[in-house]
Image (cartoon, rainbow, N blue to C red):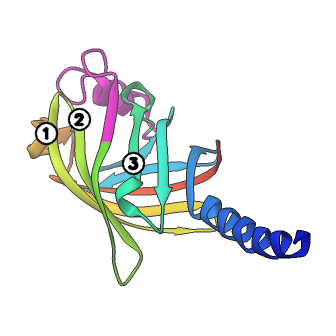
Amino acid sequence: MMQLRNFLLFPALALLTTAATLSSDYTPTEDYAVKFSTSGAEGTFKDLKGNISFDMANLSASNFDVSVATSTIETGNSTKNKHAKSDSWLDADAYPRIQFKSSAFAKTQQGYEVKGQLSLHGKSKAVTIPFSFNDNVFEGDLTVSREDFEIEGPFLFGGLVGDDVEISLKIPVQLR
């Protein structure tokens, strides 16, 4: 009888172990990258915080609720940084965090996509982010319109800045 219980117990443990590796709560590691680029300006954001739950076997159980600090914008030019944080652009004092909250996930031919609300400069807009998840690294790219979030332009510190802002995400994670 003991051998039969052990025989049944080992496959059950294997299934639980496999399920645990598919469904996980993560925290970003320090070597993440949140980059943006548009004609006339490019840079990064820091202070990534939030909750990341991802279940490849049950995407409806997944959830992203993450944000970066608006005041951490870094363009490589201190005057551009100051102007970008001002009330005529991102208004970091009034809107201290740029946030993304997921609402739905889907499997695609290239990987996955997540739909959700991007909140920036006091406005929230629905966006879709195609992404991959390999070796505990989330990678994705999206384009947002500066005008959709009522961010002034087209000049930032004397330079012409395009309306389309390309955002590139590379977020290595570890289990929480």
Name the N-terminal-most of marks 1 and 3: 3
Gap between marks 1 and 3, in whole Å? 24 Å
Gap between marks 3 and 2, in whole Å? 19 Å
Gap between marks 2 and 1, in whole Å? 6 Å
From the viewer's side, name the closer residue of 91 and 172.
Answer: 172
Name the N-terminal-most of marks 2 and 1: 2
Identity of the residue drawn at 74% across and 65% down: 13
Q: Amino acid at mark 3?
A: Asn
Residue 88, image quadrant: top left
From the viewer's side, name the closer residue of 149 and 66.
Answer: 66
Q: Give the number of the disc on residue 63.
A: 3
- In the image, taking residue 110 as reference, residue 19 lies left or right, namely right
Q: Which residue matches tag 2?
A: 120
User: 10 Å neighbourhood of mark 3: few (<14), some, or many (≥20)?
Assistant: many
Give the x, y percent position of residue 77: 43, 36
Query: Closer to the observer: label 1 or label 3?
Result: 3
| Residue extent of the magenta highlight | 75-100
Q: Secondary structure at mark 3?
A: strand
Residue placed furthest toward the top: 93
Give the x, y percent position of residue 99: 32, 36
Identity of the residue drawn at 9% across and 36% down: 150
Q: Quadrant of the C terminus?
A: top right
Give the x, y percent position of residue 115: 25, 56
Q: Which residue matches tag 1?
A: 149
